[in-house]
Amino acid sequence: MIYLDNNATTGVDPLVREAMLSYLTECYGNPSSMHRFGQEARQAIEEARRRVADLLGCEPRELIFSSGGTESDNAAILGLLASRPDRKTIITSSVEHSAVRAPLHQLARTGYRIVEIPVDTAGHLEMPTLTAAMKEPDVALATIMWANNETGVIFDVAAVAAAAKASSVPLHVDAVQAVGKLPIDLRGVHAGIDLLSLSAHKLHGPKGVGALFIRRTTRWTPLLRGGPQERERRGGTENVAGIVGLGAAATLAQQALADGQSWPRVAALRDRLEAGVLATIPETYINGDRSARTPNTTNIGFAGLEAEAILLLLSEQDICASAGAACASGSLEPSPVLQAMRLPERVAHGAIRFSLSRRSTSQEIDETLAILPGIIERLRAVMPVAHA
Ligand code: PLP
C-alpha cells in the first residue's frame, strides 16, 4: 500500500505504541485514585503534558487533554463564548475544518453573527478585511486555522494574532494540521494566540485524543463538567494510554522538527511528486500557494475529471489519497475550501489531496508517478467534456 493520506490520519509510530502498551495492560490504575497504583497513571499523564508543552512552548498547566481536534475546537469556541455572554459576533475564515464550521453554523442559528473572512485564489486570508472585522464592537472571539487540511496553505497566524490583540479579541487557532510540522512557540512569536487545538492522530499518535492550550490569562469556561480531572476544566476519567501516546508523539515530532532534515526531505518528495505530475499530465494545477504550505501536502486539480473516479482507480492500485476533506467525499459538490478559493469548477471537481508523512519514501513517489498518468489518461478518454 502507498499511503498518501496523512492529513486524514497517520500511522501510530512504533515508539508511541510501545509507550502506550503498559497503560493498556498492567498499569490500569485510575489517575484520580489516591493509591500508588493510580498515582503511577497520574505521573504518566503529567509527563505527557510536559512533553506536549515542550513541543508548543507553553506551560504544562496551560494544557488540557481532550478526545481530539473536534472536541478541542468545540470546547475552545463554546468556552470563550460562555465567558463573554454579552458579545454576539464571531470572526472566522471561509476555509475552516468542519470541526469549527459546524459549531459556528449551530451558533448562527441561535443568534450569533458569524463573520467569514474570505481567502484569495491562493488560499490566503484577506488581511485588511480581517483587521477591519476585529475592530467591530461586538466581537466575542476569532477562530482561525493555522494550516489548511486540504491545501496545506499556512496562514500568517502571528499577523492574525497581532490584529486580534490590537482589538483585544481572544483568538483560537485550530492547529491540528500544523502541530508537529511547523515550529510553534506560544511564549515567543506566537504569544498572541489565546487557545490552540491539536490532535494526536495527525502526528503519529493514537486516534481519539488531543489537547487544548488555554493561555493562563484567558477567560474560558469548561465545556465538559464532571469530576475534578484536568483541574476541573475537563471532567471524565482520562484516556491514560492515549494521553501517553500523545506525549510520546509530541517528543518524536519535536525531535523531527529539530533535526532540520526530516521535513525538508518530505517537502522534497512532495515537490518531486508535483513536478512529475505537472510534467507528465496535461491540464493539471496545483491548488493553493506553493510557497506557504505545510511540507507534506499538495492539492492537485486534474481538470475536467471527478475526484471520486480518480480516487477509485488509485485505490484499485493500492494508493490512498483523498478528495478534499474526508467528510466531504461521497458528495459531488467540490469542497467548500476550494469553492472559497474560487477555483474554476473544472479544476475543483477533479482536485486530489496527496499528503505525505515523515515515513513516506522515495519509492512510493516513484510508483505513484508511474501509475497516475495512465489513470488520468484512461478517465479523460471516457469523460472527455465533464465541466468543460
Ligand atoms: N481540524 C482540522 C484542521 C483537521 O484537519 C481535523 C481532522 O481532520 C480536525 C480539526 C478534527 O480532528 P479530530 O479528527 O481529532 O477530531
Image (cartoon, rainbow, N blue to C red):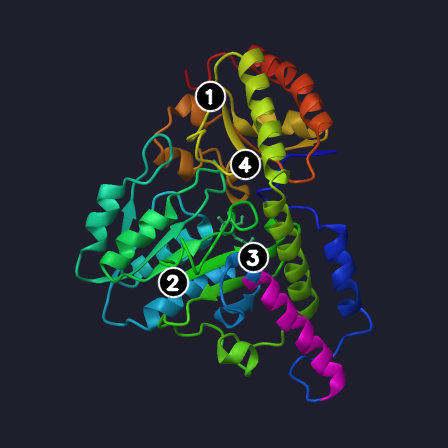
Residue at the location (44% across, 23% down)? 347
Sequence order check, earlier mark of 1 and 4: 1
CA distance separating discs 4 and 3: 18 Å
- Closest to the observer, 189 or 235: 189
| Between marks 2 and 1 in the image, the one whose residue lies nearer the viewer | 2
Quarter of the image where one finds residue 260: top right
Q: Which residues are magenta?
A: 35-53
Q: Which structural element holds mark 1?
A: strand
Residue 65 screen position, x and y as percent: 56, 67
Query: Within 8 Å: ligand 1 and the Cβ of disc 3?
Result: no
Earlier residue among tags 4 and 2: 2
Q: Secondary structure at mark 2?
A: loop
Percent x, y of residue 272:
60, 23
Residue at numbered disc 3: 55
- The outermost residue toward the bottom is 34
Q: CA distance from mark 2 to mark 1?
A: 36 Å
- Kind of residue indicated by mark 4: Pro
Percent x, y of residue 297: 54, 35
**Residue for badge 4:** 295
Residue closest to the far right: 26
| Helix, strand or loop at mark 4 | loop
Q: Is residue 90 visible?
A: no
The residue carrying mark 2 is 194
